[in-house]
Image: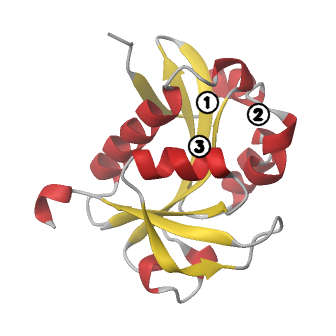
């Protein structure tokens, strides 16, 4: 059995390892750089920078925002936590960590934000691998595309929190 992916806030001890997380060059327009996301998370109220670990090794990074403000008045933004900057390090991709990490993020958000109803994200239409991963992890697409991203139109996808209550 594969070891679990753990989600932990980025601490001073984890910061260097998180900054070393990088995606393949072709994924950069979609995922961005960890340094940029960490800097943005530090100044955005309600934003949490999180390390993804297997055993004690950082294998990825994600940022969550308590509110999905980037979606503006989109109906899915209300009551949602936004998943942003999700990335598995290029050297660790292809090992099934993405799906396991999304499940671990779900559990983390459910425990940390029990008043939220769903996780919502945007993913570029051209990022086929990520779209496939999110679908396999139980995310559903909304009918409306998001056009605010720098790399082109994006799907708005969501996954319910606390599915036993819906």
Q: Residue at x 35, y 65 (%)?
A: 118
SS label for mark 3: strand
Q: Is residue 100 visible?
A: yes
- The disc, 3 or 2, on the residue closer to the chain's N-terminal end is 2
Q: Residue at x 59, y 85 (%)?
A: 72
Q: Residue at x 51, y 11 (%)?
A: 56
Asked whether 9 or 7 is in front, the reply is 7
**Which disc, if any, is residue 60?**
1
- Left or right of 59 on screen, residue 101: left
**Which disc, if any, is residue 69?**
none
The residue carrying mark 3 is 62
Contact, mark 3 vs mark 1 (Cβ under 8 Å)? yes
Mark 1: few/some/many CA within 10 Å (<14, 14-19, 20+): many
- Left or right of 163 on screen, residue 69: right
The residue carrying mark 2 is 23
Label 1 – label 2 distance at C-alpha: 9 Å
SS label for mark 2: loop
Residue 78 x %, y %: 41, 80
């Amino acid at each position: 059995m594969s070891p679990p992916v753990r989600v932990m806030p980025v601490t001073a001890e984890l910061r260097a390892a998180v900054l070393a997380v990088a995606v393949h060059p072709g994924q950069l327009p979609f995922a961005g750089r960890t340094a940029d996301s960490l800097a943005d998370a530090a100044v955005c109220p309600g934003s949490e920078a999180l390390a993804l670990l297997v055993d004690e090794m950082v294998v990825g990074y994600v940022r969550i925002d308590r509110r999905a403000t980037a979606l503006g008045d989109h109906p899915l933004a209300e009551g949602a936590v936004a998943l942003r900057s999700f990335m598995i390090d290029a050297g660790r991709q292809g090992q099934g960590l993405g799906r396991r990490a999304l499940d671990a993020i779900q559990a983390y958000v459910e425990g940390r934000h029990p008043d939220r109803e769903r996780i919502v994200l945007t993913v570029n239409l051209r990022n086929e691998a990520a779209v496939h991963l999110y679908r396999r992890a139980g995310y559903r697409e909304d009918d409306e595309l998001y056009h605010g991203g720098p790399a082109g139109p994006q799907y708005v996808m969501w996954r319910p929190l606390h599915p036993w209550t819906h």
